[in-house]
Amino acid sequence: MPELTYLQAISDGLREEMRADESVFCLGEDIGAFGGAFKVTDGFIEEFGADRVWDTPLAENAIIGTAVGAAVEGLRPVCEMQFADFISCGFDQLVNVAAKLHYRQGLSVPMTVRLPSGGGFSGGPFHSQNPEAWFLQAPGLKVVAPSSPDDAKGLIAAAIRDPSPVLFMEHKHLYRRSKGEVTEGRYETPIGEARVARAGEDLTVITYGAMVLTALEATEDLDGASIEVLDLRSLCPYDREAVLESVRKTSKVVLVQEATRSCGVAAEIAALIAEEAFEDLDGPVVRVTTPDVPIPFSPPLERAVLPQVEDVRNACRELLAY
Amino acid sequence: MATSPAREAGVEREGGGQTPSLTADDRRVLLRFMLLMRATEERALTLYRQGKVPGSFYDGRGQEATAVGPAFALGPRDRTCILHRDLGAHLVRGVTPGRVLAQMMGRAGGVTGGKDANMHFADQSVGAVQMVSMLPDMALVACGLALAFQMRDEQRVAMTWFGDGATANGQWHEAMNVAGVRQLPVVFVLENNQWAYSTPNEREFAVDPVERAAGYGFRGLKVDGNDVEAVFAAAAEACERARSGGGPTLIEAETMRMHGHGAHDDMRYVPKEMFEEWEARDPIRRYEERLGAEGVDVEPIRASVKEELDGETEWALAQPMPDPSGATAGVFGESEPELGDGSAPWSRWSAEAHGA
Amino acid sequence: MSSSPIDSGLLEVTMPQMGVSVAEGTIVGWKKQPGDAVEADEPIVEISTDKVETEVPAPGGGRLKEILVETGETVDVGTVLATIEPPAASVAAGEAPSAPAAEAPAAGGEQRPSAGGDGGAPEHGDGRAPPVTPVVRRMAEEHNLDLSQIEGSGRRGRVTKKDVLAYLRERPEAAPEEEPPEEAAPEPALHMESPYREEEPAVEAAAPAPGARELSVMRKRIAEHMVRSLRTAAHCTTIVEADMSRIEAARGRRSYLPFVARATIAALREHPGLNATLEGDMLTVHEEVHLGIAVSLGEQGLIVPVIRNAHELSHEGLATRIKDLAERARSKRLTADEVAGGTFTITNPGAYGAVLATPIINQPQVAILDLEAVVKRPVVLTDADGNDSIAIRPMTYLCMSWDHRALDGALAAQFLSTLKQRIEGWQG
């Protein structure tokens, strides 16, 4: 198996789906001639033509709205938000039209929206957000957030083939930092299944996206403790069984997310554990998240709010000693 | 007020006279659909007043021509995004009045099975995509349908309706712009019924929206929205243009909402003279008079509509309420989307089918 | 802790099934407290269901060990309300239930106060007992562990899950997990107690206004039923005046009620549309008359026992049944099925002197007749020749509330007219 970056893996997955299925096409801002702000679709316009790699006007509702129409008419659109932050401009089409159409009318909307998300490189308040939790309150949308190249390729394929609208959170920090062996050819990573990134006995860190790398680094050698790291991969639906199984094993849980604190994925998982695994807990459920603030620009300020390796390490130490 | 002399002068009368492509039977069918729309809505309002319709009630009284006329131009494989004032378009495409009444009552037999309210429905088996409350949104979805036709090089049309209020919203602009940029095979029917809830045209826009079409790079024209043949003719021409690669058309059909925004709205803001002026231009009465003058006996049509509706109402009232266990079902897609073909009652389509 | 197994030697007092449709009951009050001696069949708790109030007798004699459901709580039928320790078992457990402080002091005289029976974890350093986490609490129960015997490695000496696992691995005579019931038997039952049950929710409630008191369970039920009826039915009240002379002559010193009841039954047989029940959109017209009679229980409230197949009873039979049911209602000896299934109800506040009322229908019936006081009034009489005269007659108002959803005013008036004729033409 070749070793690819996360970016190459997404690009490969997308390209393979477009080669295999004529109904798959991409639309978004600057994705054609320029190859996209992060070069995920670099070279696509040459291979697939301007119709299937559509440089749209600067209009997120138009991107998502036309994708809905094309999807119900049998195409498989893959929308690119230039930054995940810009999804706010397409919010209405996503949560009111795309999300609810199957429930209301029984009409599936098989479309994918790619969301380059996350901070850590001085993007400031409008190029650093992790807006996944906004969509957990919009029933009908699926949300995935892979951390490894292999999962990224498998999940972009699964998202494209899924009959529901799927938001594909691709963390910008991972694009060139996350590297790994990637399965050749077309395959799917099932939506809704978590992955044990590292098995352990004493404590579980549950996380997703870029924070998987942070968690692995933080717990690689933590005073000899045996730490499990669970990579959720899918946020909606998420893998309840994998969460509960790990909690039952270790009885101690640290939840890590880069998104802001309140009502996020970590809060949801913490609630699940409180409801379903209360009698398995051997300590409080602990969250490590960004506080409820916009993401600041200047490096020391940004580092102060985003969860760092040391924050995860400290949280784990505290809980281990409890 | 809403029909100022300046705006009247701008009205481009398309096919206002006899439309050669409509047969005598077509005309009877046009009248019948308008009558069926009005009768269905009147029956629904009765059910609402009897306490059988939960929630709000909206209808399209006075707008029967703008609903029926454009839909009548569509071929079977064309697709629609229909607004809540346009019951007639659903009827033309093949939805039965009984399912509409059951829909209003939140019954299991309604088009959405109780999942969505009142006129928020569409039947995918006849090629319709369901509207949302954010009124310009479906213009973008229609663009997406048209995009699929264009990418697959199919001679098909997407048609959508919206009101004067929707043209003030940003998404409307995004839709017009995308349609113009891609020259999509889409027909926009702007039903200018003078009122966005209680807000009159002059508070919605400074420039008549039909004039904006040129700015987006496609054709716009204005028709008498209470003349069913005029609206039909404009739509038929727009559909032909779209099919032949000529791009989108914005048709502004000028009409008047003769009921309140919903059943709760007493229309206190509508000047009496304005209401009376439009009352005199009722699209159904005008068309009945016109056909009557041409020797068509409209009474049997009226009688058959009443008979059909009585049966449909009985069916609707016999439908059970939905099983509460279904309330959490169907959140996520389960299979390929399947939009079916709609009815196309215009004789042109049967002639084409026979010819083919 | 509520699912803890109960020692096989204990008797369980459960919420009884008071009639087929009864699913739950509310504790009105305990007549015994833990530690009290209890005799077999002695009433130990008063309960209320939406049908009746009754007392639950002890299933056997002994000492009331533990009350598991407090006054005011509503629980499903079959729920264990209390446990009773038979005499033999009581010897072993001593006075344990009411006196946790009597637990033997730890060996060596070291002061180790019990942590409220909460697993018995010792206090450390700062005077606060370290917390017992859910998983440790559960494991301690599963394996019958005394946590005070385990060295804690967590914060403030907390016993962690790891500590428990290590203890289980290392303890010398670790019993196989299948056998804990055998091992548990000699343990004093005290150990299973949860401190949570000692909390009195009522004590923590906000102080009520001076003089305010909570409605009784029965009054709450009545309130709920009455409000629901008013919200459900389209109430109309129709009133006719009846001359009671003939009944007055026939009754002697007996009550009017059986006479009016009998006339009502006859009128119902003639107009079965009033002898009906309406549930949702389903109207059932009954042939048999199951007559409800509202019986006042004074301040407590009122109850409506039902005379089944009242139309089959003779006048005397009817009178006897009414008397019997009223007596048993007042002494709380009605069964649930004796207050269910009525098709029509008579209420009789007239006995207290009221002359007019608009009663509330007893759901799902469609009408209720209100018998008011009989008072002497001057009335105009017309003789066979058409001559009018004024006479003094014992008169009453027959007030009937009926459900306009089920019937219309004409039928109500026809029924009352028939009733009036039967009363005025009473033949005995």
Image: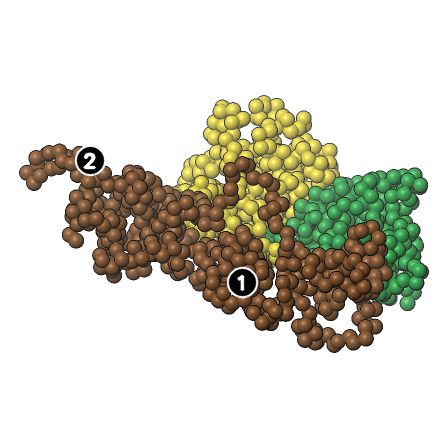
Chain colours: A green, B yellow, C brown
| Nearer to me, C328 or B278 | C328
| Nearer to me, B275 or A271 | A271
Residue at mark 2: C377
Q: Position of residue A230 (x, y in %)?
A: 82, 60
| Nearer to me, A231 or C44 | C44
Vertical placement of C123 versus C4: above or below?
above
For the residue marked with disc 2, what is the amino acid?
Arg
Q: Does the rendering let one see residue C20?
A: yes
Q: Quadrant of residue C85?
A: bottom right
Residue at image location 92% in from the left, 51% down from the top: A310
Residue at mark 1: C37
The Cα–Cα distance between marks 2 and 1, rounded to whole angstroms, is 61 Å
Q: Position of residue A260 (x, y in %)?
A: 80, 45
Vertical placement of A12 versus B238: above or below?
below
Q: Residue furthest front?
A: C109
Chain of the residue under the numbered disc 2 shown in the image: C
Q: Position of residue A35 (x, y in %)?
A: 87, 49
For the residue marked with disc 1, what is the amino acid?
Ala
Residue at image location 68% in from the left, 60% down from the top: C102
Chain of the residue under the numbered disc 1 shown in the image: C
Q: Does the rendering let one see residue A179?
A: no
SS type, badge 2: strand
Q: Position of residue C416 (x, y in %)?
A: 25, 45
So how many labels did they put on this image? 2
Q: Are marks 2 and 1 on the same chain?
A: yes
